Amino acid sequence: MRRLLPDQHELSLDDLYEGLTLPAGDARPWVALGMVATLDGAAAVDGATADLGGEADGIAFRRLRGAADAILVGAGTVRDENYGPPSGTAERRSDRQTRGLAERPRLVIVTGSLNLPTDHRVFSDPDQRPLIVTHGQASPDAVGRLEEVADVLRVGEGTIDLEAALIELGTRGLRRILCEGGPSLNGALLAADLVDEVFLTISPVAAGGGTSRIIRSEVPEVAHRFAVASLYEHDGELVVRYCRER
Ligand SMILES: NC(=O)c1ccc[n+]([C@@H]2O[C@H](COP(=O)([O-])OP(=O)(O)OC[C@H]3O[C@@H](n4cnc5c(N)ncnc54)[C@H](OP(=O)(O)O)[C@@H]3O)[C@@H](O)[C@H]2O)c1
């Protein structure tokens, strides 16, 4: 594999993001998006990402999870991708502990509807209760049901206040947030200018169709600028780290 930026030299695939650390953030936790897209910007093919990422993306995905205190994800992705609790080999768990992180990242799910059955795979490990972020007008019955399998955090009145949610995560020691999408959650974070970095794998696949881009929102477009911090290529995949220029 080759690293194209900041300088160009051969690396072993396993060197990709080796020892990656994420900043803890300042007034609020640091937010990094970790996404894969086709060369024409599609976030999914046939409603899932399974056909998009190759070897380099798989390593980037694991390294990002290895550096995060929490994985933030929209309920749509939990449902579409049948998310489970974060796994991790004994080696990876011990590597995290050596670096001062918890054994596993905490899974944080954003949902307004609370439409997640309690027997969903994501709730299958009682030792890894996800944290559910919803708003103050969420149905008390649905909250009560989900509190059997998860911790529930209500922020904002009729809508979720994502910045307040992040600050609350920070008070719980979750300061390095990896957001794994999907496009709607990414869009809400971008609209509130809460995205500090984007780790993007561009897959050498063209999708066509009408699939969502990796960041989508109903609000008018913004033009937030990012700088390229690093760029790798392996087997046609481009692995880019973009940092927000503020
Ligand atoms: N290419 C990639 O790297 C990547 C990564 C992740 C997902 N995907 C793909 O993206 C697709 C899913 O995308 P998506 O945009 O539908 O899903 P999403 O962003 O994961 O989830 C959307 C849902 O999350 C909740 N949500 C997100 N933002 C919210 C906010 N600001 N306020 C309240 N609730 C919020 C809502 O849940 P409720 O409906 O429960 O209220 C909303 O319906 C799938 O096809 C998946 O395969 C691709």
Image (tube, rainbow, N blue to C red):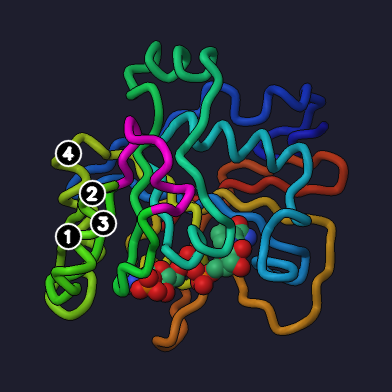
Q: Residues within 10 Å of mark 1 (few under 14, many from 20)?
A: few
Q: Distance between the residues labelled 1 and 2?
A: 7 Å
Residue 150 horizontal side relative to residue 229, left or right: left
Amino acid marked by disc 4:
Arg
Question: In the picture shown, does residue 81 fall above or below 173?
Answer: below
x and y percentages locating residue 162 in the rendered image: 25, 64
Q: In this view, does 211 lie to the left or right of 216?
A: right
The residue identified by callout 1 is 144
Residue 191 in view, yes or no: no
Which residue is disc 2 drawn over?
Answer: 148
Location of mark 4 (residue): 172
Residue span colored magenta: 119-130
Give the CA distance from mark 4 to mark 1: 21 Å
Q: Are marks 1 and 2 in contact (CB under 8 Å)?
A: yes
- Residue 232 visible in the shown view: yes
Q: Distance between the residues labelled 1 and 3?
A: 6 Å
Circle 2 Cα neighbour tier, 10 Å, few/some/many (<14 / 14–19 / ≥20) = few
Which one is closest to the eye, mark 4 or mark 1? 1
The answer to which of 32 and 70 lies nearer the viewer is 70
What residue does disc 3 label? 146
CB contact under 8 Å: marks 3 and 2: yes
